[in-house]
Image: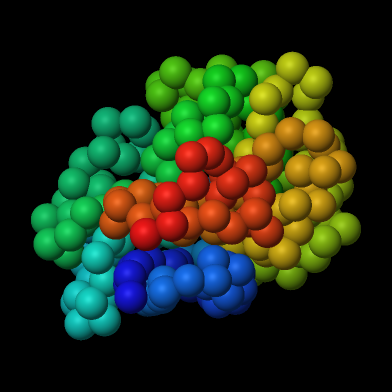
Amino acid sequence: MTALGFLYPGHSAEDDYPRIEQLLGSDIRLDLVHTDIGEDAHRVDALLEMGSAGRLAAGVEELRMSGAESVVWACTSGSFVYGWEGAHDQVRALARTAGMPASSTSFAFVHAAREIGATRVAVGATYPDDVAGLFAEFLRAAGIEVVGVRPSGIITAAEVGTWGEAEVFALAREADDESAEAVLLPDTALHTAAYIPSLEKELGKPVLTANQVTVWEALRLADRRVNAPELGALFTREPIIQA
């Protein structure tokens, strides 16, 4: 059994994780600890507080007790808002506190894009324009070309969590660009786990979503590789090694 740990802010789309656990179809357990988000707002000051070391550290002991082999801060905006260097500092502090390999959803997107060979991406963000722009800056700092950003102007994760299939597909379609090698949907408050193969079929390219890449990143840190086609192109890369 491989146990993977996640620090998830508040309550919005956490039910993506048991769905993903089921789709992985192997001896992998996904353990979520909900962090206190403070003010639910896609606003820079609130996001900096949401991702602060103290808030993350508060959930770490519970994950250690669960036997987790890696931990991912399952929040995109609460990591990229710190910038490239600040986000590195954030996960280094988390790794020290947790005593295990650590990462965040922002770095998960970078590593996942590299995994599928996508150097040009389009972004469909639920965030307001300024916050969406910070994600694009983060990706560019990683050497990824961002050919377009489609913000949605939503302030709260609670509202994002109410979006269903129609809204997710609309966001992905509007974000897509013919020059993009992949479409990224960066909010862990957005339900996407049920839609990834259908999204990829419609757009004709890989789609990377926040909760999907977060789980993939935790597996990567734990040196596990799982073939799970129902989770999209990211989980069907060759060669497949089923540990």
Give the left or right position of residue 199, taking residue 117 as reference: right
Give the left or right position of residue 194, taking residue 44 as reference: right
Question: Would you place residue 101 above or below residue 159 in this image?
Answer: above
The one of 224 and 147 positioned closer to us in this rendering: 224
- Which color scheme did the rendering employ for the protein? rainbow
Q: Residue placed at 18% from the left, 46% from the top?
A: 92
Q: Residue placed at 80% from the left, 21% from the top?
A: 178
Question: Would you place residue 24 above or below residue 144 in this image?
Answer: below
The one of 109 and 223 positioned closer to us in this rendering: 223
Q: Position of residue 195 (x, y in %)?
A: 75, 58
Q: What is the quadrant of residue 87 in the picture?
A: top left
Q: What is the quadrant of residue 184 in the picture?
A: top right
Give the left or right position of residue 62, taking residue 177 as reference: left
Q: Position of residue 34 (x, y in %)?
A: 41, 75
Q: Quadrant of the N terminus?
A: bottom left
Kindly tell me whether residue 97 is visible in this rendering: no
The one of 71 and 106 positioned closer to us in this rendering: 71
Question: Would you place residue 128 above or below residue 228 in this image?
Answer: above
Q: Quadrant of the C terminus?
A: bottom left
Give the left or right position of residue 41, taking residue 198 as reference: left
Kindly tell me whether residue 119 is visible in this rendering: yes
Q: Position of residue 65 (x, y in %)?
A: 20, 82
Report the number of numbered marks.
Answer: 0
Q: Residue placed at 87% from the left, 58% from the top?
A: 166
Q: Residue placed at 25% from the left, 65% from the top?
A: 69
Q: Position of residue 25 (x, y in %)?
A: 54, 71
